Amino acid sequence: MTNYKLNNLNLSKLKEQVSIPEYNRSNIKTGIVHVGIGGFHRAHQAYYTDELLHDESVKDWGICGVALLDFDTKIYNVLKEQDGLYTLIVKELDGTLTKRVIGSIVEYLFAPENPQAVIEKMASPDVKIISLTITEGGYNYNESTKQFDFNNPLIQYDLENPSSPKTIFGYLTQALKLRKERKLKGLSVQSCDNIQGNGHMTQKMLLSYVAKAEPELVDWINSNVSFPNAMVDRITPATSASDISNLKETSGIDDAWPVVCEPFKQWVIEDNFVAGRPSWEKVGAQFVEDVEPFEKMKLQLLNAGHSVLGIIGALMGYDTIDEVANNEDVNRFLRAYMRQEVAPILNDLTGVDLESYEASLLERFGNIYIKDQIDRICSESSAKFPIFILPTVNAQLKQNGTIKHAALVIAAWAIYSLGVNEAGKTLLIKDAMQSTLQEKALAAKNNPKAFLEIEAIFGVLKDSEPFVKAYTAAYHNIVKNGIEKCVLDTNRNLLKYI
């Protein structure tokens, strides 16, 4: 089979092998600037937009993808070389692969190379939406103070160097300032990250920064910029070398960075766009007045479930999520966590069959063709636990409910943070707070409560006697008996406090 490098020139040659964009990409105008052009954005928002662009009447909603960090050099270079094109590979539950080339990213910028170009693009009158996938940690939120973290060195840099920022807050501030000065209309800033009330969070964090950086801009933002909340869902593992080679061998596509994902997808959006929006509802998105019930369900079941499987699986020596999800005892543990600890605190889910949703999650986690790496799921756990796990703990504590499953997972995280699994193999830990986690994990060997003293993560949870008791007991049990035995004992309601 002849192999073709994926780009505009070769696109028509691939039509026999895969679905390709049937619209004229050169006629598409950029209406969305998206910051964070990783796998999830390309499997989700860019996919929905590509679907919509096949409607010949839609020409104003192309995406300009922005690579924000030095770390993003590779993805920027790939998109640049491939004219913004990439292949989306959907791994179906029966093992078949559905492939299509996505063309909705019609421009691409590398922020560290040219900050002013990014600011100008965000300030363009054609741009109606700036959307974000910057990860949970990208919002610069301190869990202890519940405020914006001005101690972050990158934030301090942006305050001192407004024309060449490094964070999303510096870029948004300067772009919105230009829009105000040029008497342009406002726009919508749309978070697509896994944070409950992600629009509210974006608004609060941005206005906190603006109040210090450009205080005269605050009123204009309040009057001209909207921050719609959204719930996003599609499991998107890291692309492997075998995914790339398989695509080339089976379809003749030489794509340096395709995206793989599961078939399931969901996007629930608050309809709050001040400058217009794409009709994503025509291609499967759902617009609602209140996203919060959907957010809570997804964050505290799917995202939390991923973290539960990731931490337990890492200690047990598994490499991928499907492996640990198909361990019968861990599967039963996760089902009980969702039923006994999460479900009782979810509400306002009119028309949602929660038990069916939970069952579908277990099926999705166990998809043997996805092969989501555990070290990816466990990365940046310091940003994930306060959003995915701790709201369940705090809600259960308020109503004197059960917390034994969550306590075991948090104790397992403390032990995981030592950096080795139970077989003595070094764990690959990627976390902005890695040094603090390891320091407190070492202290926890003598006093398990020490791990809970990371206020930026746990807040005042260390002062909760019921939680500390359950967590400490779980910690000692894991050390003494191993995580697998503790999971089994919890399933049998035989967890012994020692």
Image: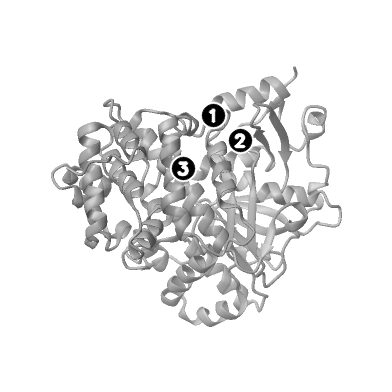
- Residue at 46% x, 48% y is 338
Q: Nearer the viewer, residue 228 or 94?
A: 94
**Which residue is drawn at the image coordinates 56% and 77% (left, top)?**
221
Residue 240's mark? 1
Q: CA distance from mark 1 to mark 3?
A: 29 Å
Does the CB distance between marks 2 and 1 fall below 8 Å? yes
Label for residue 376? none
Secondary structure of residue under mark 3: helix
What residue is disc 2 on?
A: 260
In this rendering, the answer to whether 248 lies above or below 345 is: above
* The C terminus - image quarter: top left
Q: Which residue occupies the extreme left position in the image?
A: 446
Picture coordinates of residue 370, whole percent (x, y): 56, 32
Q: Which mark is residue 335?
A: 3
Image height of 239 relative to 445, above or below: above
Amino acid under disc 2: Val
Cα gap from disc 2 to disc 1, whole angstroms: 9 Å
In percent of width and height, residue 95 lies at 64, 26
